[in-house]
Amino acid sequence: MEGYLTGISSVTLFHDHLTPVTKPPEQKMKILQQIRRPYYRACFTVLIMLCGYQGYGQIDLKNSLPDLKTQFRNAADDKSRIRLAVTIGGFFLTNKERYEMVEDSAGKYVTVAESINKNINDKASADLIAILQARILLRKEKFAAVNEMIGKASGALFCQLHALAGNYFLEKPGEDKSDLDIAEGHFLTAQSYAHNKGMPSIELINMVYRYNVMIERRKDEQSCETFLKQVLNLCESYRLPYIRLKALQAKAIHDFYHRNLVGSMYKAEIAARAVHDVPEETFCRKQIADYYLRQGNLDSAEINLNRVLKVYQSLGYKNLQFTYDLLVATAMVRGNLDQAMRYSLTLISIAESTGTDIALNGFYSRLAGICKDLGLDRQSAMWYKKWRDAAVLKKANFPQQAYFELADEMLAAGKPRQVLNMLDSAQKLFKHDEITAYFLPQLRSNCYEALHKTDSAEFFNKVIINQVEVRGLKDYLYYSAYKRMASFYVLHGQFSKAAPFLKMVFDAGGAVVPAAEMALLYSFQSKVDSARGNYLSALNYFKKSKNISDSIYNAKKLEQTKRLQLQFATAERDRENLDLRNRNNLQNSELEKGMLHRKLISIALGAFVLISGLMLYFYRVKLKTNRLLHKSQQEIHNQNEQLKASQEEITAQNEQLKLHQDEINARNEQLRANQEEISLQNDQLNQLLQEKEWLIKEIHHRVKNNLQIISSLLNTQASYLDSEQAVAAIRDSQNRMQAISIVHQRLYQSDDLATISIRLYIKELSECILDSFHGNNRIKFKINLTDALLDTARTVPLGLILNEAITNSVKYAFDKTTTGIITLSSSITDDNLYELVIRDNGRGLPDDFDMYACNSLGVNMIIGLTDQLGGRVSFATDGGTVIAIAFPV
């Protein structure tokens, strides 16, 4: 909605009363043209205001193209350059008229940004580039490529691309159902994705877009309000005030044709103020001013527009032409052409300096009309020419206003049928929109009027009335349609039919209808009253018409016109002076070039003389140098003879050194042969060592197997014995052999054939002993051992000691109902002894126990084997039997 051309075009003022309808047809046509010219210029501008620039909501108001390019050149880092490249590309899409070169220019900045991002591979920058790329593809209607981009995207980018595509189809003219279906599909997909991914702000903004689709579908007001209320409630729940602002703005914009727009936009303005978003707050204020202007509340419109202009200037916004445009419209409705002229010149200057040419042709055309109404024909022609040149340069579509101007000229030349043919062709070539709905019936009515087909002309005037009634907004366009109908009936002497249409216009008052047109309407009413015989009323309306005309074209207005003419003359003189200065500068530049050439020739001659002198000097120096060189060469020859003698002496010494070197090489060969022999012997020794290790492992394996065979034989023997004492003795022998067998098993399974890990050995031995008692589940082991490495000679005695200690605990420490715990713990003492403690929680030793007086085989074996280890042993009772053994490691 931003940037609507809401200025009302200038109007021509009429001093003469309408002549009676009995005048000849050619005089009547002159009168019709006199009425038609200002009326259509005004109506056409209003139509553009309402329909022609629907896409301006995304215009970049802040930046100018030259400034952006300067910032890009001076950017400090790659990320900044990418951001500026994308901004410049977006500027081409939003601030430029739509033609092929614009999209190509935007595409070049996409290429630049992609090239820079290859160096840094920044994800956020890549997303910005993708969004701009999608916008360009949508402008080119390459929807398959956009869908392919969406398919590859994820996260927020996926939703942003869907939203871009949806808004493209939503904003397409015509409100085609298939376009709206596609738009809603994109918004629903983005909303669902954002909901599943936990992105509430993106989810809700797509709901706002869906609300816009509902409005475009012309859903009933209750359904739209219910959906919007749901969105606003979710914004409150998620605490998303910015999305709430966007929802309120959407409601206000769609209320543009209803009486409650100001209230809705005020709510949006308050929401923007709450989130400290000054640009959005100012945008809302500008929309309110725009609405006031449409409704004829000129004072409120002007006050708010000046506030908007001041805020935008404080924010550093560059594209202020659209705000000035509304000020032009305000001045036009007031009849203040002088002020309208100044505002128009200002806004055109801004648009040209910022590189924003969107709507610029309309600005040119309207300023040309103002100049024409002020009698500045030469300036008017200049602006019309500028408008046409710009349209040709951009290869833009033939503007609809051009149809109006061309048709007006052709009607004046008496070619109404050619105009009708031109309009028929236009209907086939161009897609109809809201402008065409008002524009074509007006021109057709003019054509039939020129052909004296009054009924057809009246029919198309009624078509215009139907259009404004359906639209339902009583603004300038609405009353202009009724004014046109009244003018038609007055010109044809049908005063009774004209009266109700004039009353409709008078009810609007001068706030909506420009002063000059009100003067014309008063003259119409004077004729209507005169035809009715109400001469006093007719005289009063005549006086009103005359007073307005005189007040507009009084001495002050004439002085303003002279001043404007002087301003234009001054501006032209300045432009001519600038051209003269440029030509003078060019001539000075040519003179400077000539002087420079002469200077260069002089310098070249001087250089030639200098070089010639230097060459002569260097020639003489060369002769002298040659003589010196000849003398030096003779000396060098003598020195060479001496060097030759020295060389022969050195050659003889080299021969002697070569003999010594051969002798050294022979000795090296001998050493190399000796080394190879040593390497061969080492390989043989390594092979013998490996065989020895294999043999040792095999011996350990066979010893272990033999011990197992003996254990099996004992087990078989035990099965034939009836004496429990004999069976127990055999089991003890089996356990002792198992202790020795585990040592040999560990040795042949390990890469280290000399030592065994105490911790692993004791753990395996304890499990085997417990298994020999058929898995006694009442007895548990607690093992907390410090690891150490022992050789075979000491591992076997240690295993036998453990076997005796654990066997005694299992057999004698516990009764049949007690759960026994045997604890094995070890540590290394300060004097480097390995201390092993075997503890049970059984009944303990007898009070009179003496290990040296004890006749137990097991105890005696423990004592003897401890001596064999070179260690000490102790027996004690502490909650059970405790045996402590310490030996060196």
Image (tube, rainbow, N blue to C red):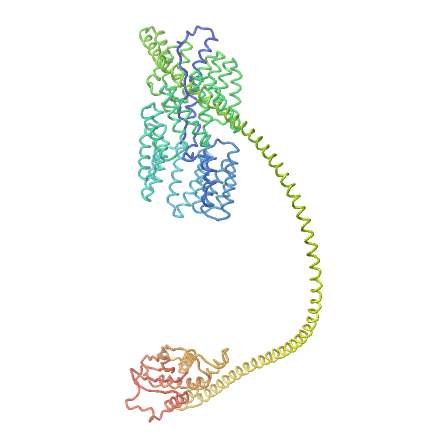
Question: Residue shown at 69%/51% (left/top)?
Answer: 626
Q: Nearer the viewer, residue 1 or 418?
A: 1
Q: Eyeballing the image, is 120 above or below 53?
A: below
Q: Nearer the viewer, residue 646 or 727?
A: 646
- The part of the image, by quadrant, that contains residue 801 is bottom left
Q: Position of residue 728 (x, y in %)?
A: 40, 88
Lateral position of residue 753 relative to residue 762, left or right: right
Question: Residue shown at 53%/22% (left/top)?
Answer: 425
Q: Residue furthest left?
A: 847
Q: Nearer the viewer, residue 70 or 452?
A: 70
Q: Position of residue 621 (x, y in %)?
A: 66, 48
Q: How many marks?
A: 0
Lateral position of residue 222 relative to residue 384, left or right: left
Q: Eyeballing the image, is 683 above or below 386?
A: below
Q: Quadrant of the N terminus?
A: top left
Q: Quadrant of the C terminus?
A: bottom left
Q: Position of residue 750 (x, y in %)?
A: 49, 78
Q: Nearer the viewer, residue 41 or 476?
A: 41
Q: Eyeballing the image, is 266 above or below 533?
A: below
Confirm whether residue 830 shows in the render: yes
Q: Position of residue 132 (x, y in %)?
A: 47, 40
Confirm whether residue 1 shows in the render: no
